[in-house]
């Protein structure tokens, strides 16, 4: 049992109402009642969200936040009601990509729930809004991180949504595991880059999704070459084919290969990614294959 479970956050571990570790049967029972209330609150909130999409990656820096943001933007552009939750504890990039750094976390005084920021029709919430200074590092022990992830799922006033796109913490540790447990029925996109080190981690992510019964929509290979600004030829920067090979072997679809786009990188640094993506919608964009798979989830309902 982890420290987190022991601190009454998971009284499921105590069936008798007296686990012996916390002193009294009464405290176990009240912890259980409190947990049941929290679970009910979580379920009530999630029931109002038709589709949940977790954007995961084996490691940081591969463009997971970018994929999550692009997906959320394009879904909103299709008239869907969309929430974007950035819960990448150690690298919350969404505030930077949207120029929302320094925005305080809004709280509804009536329900004490967190309020997402309304941004160009998107509802956005980032764990980065907790940081007063963007250079602050989050140094939390595991149980605290897990508690915060739970709060960001359970205590946010999303209202009715067609889609909640979640920018998940990278890797296959306790943090993504907590998310997977809290958001049953979520669909997953796994983002990677063409290098061997990244695809090796993606295998782990795919196995992780299978173990925790998350539906895998497919893999997105990002930073897959660079289009020459002069001759428009695609320059393969990394040895090609890594993700395609891995996807074939692991029997998951490779949904798209997204090139490095220097204008997008500039838009990221300028905090205007939403506008850039919105203004550059293009029928030839390889990302549309990702969008179509996600839109099909709503059509199936
Ligand atoms: P992660 O969430 O995996 O840590 P990010 O989405 O924050 O990674 O991306 C890291 C950096 O790379 C960001 O500055 C982002 O703007 C940039 N980036 C991601 N994908 C692309 C791309 N296809 N073209 C140009 N820049 C990109």
Image (cartoon, rainbow, N blue to C red):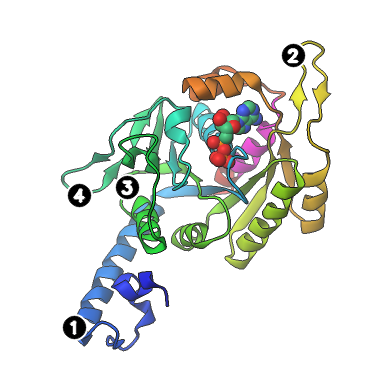
Q: Classify 238 as above or below 26.
A: above
| Residue on which disc 2 sits | 229
Q: Nearer the viewer, mark 4 or mark 1?
A: 1
Of the numbered discs 2 and 1, the one sitting upstream in the chain is 1
| Residue on which disc 3 sits | 156
Ligand 1 is within 8 Å of the C-beta of the residue at disc 2: no
Of the numbered discs 2 and 3, the one sitting upstream in the chain is 3
Q: Nearer the viewer, mark 1 or mark 3?
A: 1
Query: Image quadrant of residue 141?
Result: bottom left
Q: Relative to the observer, which residue lies in front, 263 or 82?
A: 263
| Residue on which disc 1 sits | 26
Contact between marks 2 and 4 (CB within 8 A): the answer is no
Q: Nearer the viewer, mark 2 or mark 3?
A: 2
Q: Position of residue 164 (x, y in %)?
A: 46, 44
**Secondary structure of the residue carrying numbered label 1:** helix
Q: CA distance from mark 1 to mark 3?
A: 30 Å
Q: CA distance from mark 4 to mark 1?
A: 27 Å
Q: Relative to the observer, which residue lies in front, 115 or 142?
A: 142
Q: Residue at x 54, y 49 (%)?
A: 54
Query: Image quadrant of residue 19?
Result: bottom left
Q: Nearer the viewer, mark 2 or mark 4?
A: 2
Residue 68 is left or right of residue 49, and the answer is right
Of the numbered discs 2 and 4, the one sitting upstream in the chain is 4
Q: Nearer the viewer, mark 2 or mark 1?
A: 2
Query: Image quadrant of residue 27?
Result: bottom left
Q: Classify 11 as above or below 66.
A: below
Question: What are the residue bounds of the magenta stretch?
Answer: 285-296
Of the numbered discs 4 and 1, the one sitting upstream in the chain is 1
Q: Position of residue 110 (x, y in %)?
A: 16, 46
Q: Is residue 288 magenta?
A: yes
Q: Position of residue 134 (x, y in %)?
A: 38, 34
| Residue on which disc 4 sits | 111
């Amino acid at each position: 049992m982890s420290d987190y479970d022991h601190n009454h956050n998971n009284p499921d571990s105590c069936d008798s109402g007296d686990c012996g570790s916390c002193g009294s049967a009464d405290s176990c029972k009240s912890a259980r009642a409190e947990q049941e209330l929290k679970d009910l609150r979580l379920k009530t909130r999630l029931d109002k969200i038709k589709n949940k999409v977790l954007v995961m990656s084996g490691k940081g820096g591969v463009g997971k936040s970018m994929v999550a943001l692009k997906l959320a933007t394009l879904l909103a552009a299709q008239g869907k009601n969309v929430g974007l939750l950035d819960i990448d504890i150690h690298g919350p990039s969404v505030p930077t990509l949207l120029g929302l750094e320094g925005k305080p976390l809004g709280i509804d005084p009536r329900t004490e729930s967190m309020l997402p920021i309304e941004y160009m029709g998107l509802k956005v919430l980032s764990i980065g809004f907790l940081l007063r200074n963007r250079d602050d590092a989050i140094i939390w022990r595991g149980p605290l991180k897990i508690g915060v992830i739970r709060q960001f799922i359970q205590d946010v006033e999303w209202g009715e949504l067609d889609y909640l796109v979640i920018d998940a913490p990278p890797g296959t540790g306790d943090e993504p595991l907590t998310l997977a447990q809290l958001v049953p029925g979520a669909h997953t996109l796994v983002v990677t880059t063409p290098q061997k080190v990244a695809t090796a981690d993606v295998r782990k992510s795919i196995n992780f999704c299978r173990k925790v019964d998350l539906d895998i929509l497919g893999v997105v290979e990002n930073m897959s070459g660079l289009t020459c600004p002069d001759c428009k030829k695609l320059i393969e920067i990394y040895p090609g084919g890594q993700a395609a090979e891995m996807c074939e072997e692991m029997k998951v679809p490779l949904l798209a290969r997204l090139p490095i786009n220097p204008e997008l990188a500039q838009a990221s640094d300028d905090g205007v990614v939403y506008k850039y993506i919105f203004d550059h919608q293009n029928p030839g964009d390889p990302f549309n294959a990702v969008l179509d798979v996600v839109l099909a989830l709503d059509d199936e309902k």
